[in-house]
Amino acid sequence: MKNLNIPLFLLALLAVFCFMLVGVAIGYRSVIFSLIFLLLGFSVMGFGFVVKRKQRNQEA
């Protein structure tokens, strides 16, 4: 098994948590918070992809 990359793992957990908060905001019928958490979730996920690509390019 490969080593666990802790920073990327934490970024993935943060993205999942943001998307979970979208569901909570929808439950509270708060459109503003659901949009904020949705944008934040996609931003965190995109940042994680960028970091992973940079790490992969440095290894090669």
Image (cartoon, rainbow, N blue to C red):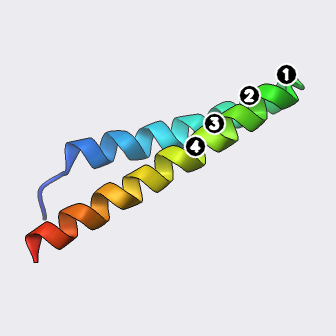
Which mark is drawn over residue 41? 4
Quadrant of the snapshot with the C terminus: bottom left
Q: Residue at x 81, y 28 (%)?
A: 32
Amino acid type, callout 1: Tyr
Q: Decide: few, some or many residues near mark 1? Use Cα within 10 Å; few <14, some 14-19, many ≥20.
A: few
Amino acid type, callout 2: Val
Q: Residue at x 90, y 26 (%)?
A: 29
Quadrant of the snapshot with the N terminus: bottom left
Residue 22 at x, y = what percent?
A: 71, 35
C-alpha span from label 4 to label 3 = 9 Å
In this rendering, the label closer to the viewer, 4 or 3: 4
CB contact under 8 Å: marks 1 and 4 = no
C-alpha span from label 2 to label 4 = 14 Å
CB contact under 8 Å: marks 4 and 3 = no
Q: Decide: few, some or many residues near mark 3? Use Cα within 10 Å; few <14, some 14-19, many ≥20.
A: some
C-alpha span from label 1 to label 3 = 13 Å
Residue 22 is left or right of residue 7, and the answer is: right
CB contact under 8 Å: marks 2 and 4 = no
Query: What residue sits right under mark 1 in the picture?
Result: 28
In this rendering, the label closer to the viewer, 1 or 4: 4
Please identify the residue farthest to the right as the structure is shown. Answer: 29
Residue 27 is left or right of residue 18, and the answer is: right
In this rendering, the label closer to the viewer, 2 or 4: 4
Query: What residue sits right under mark 3 in the picture?
Result: 20
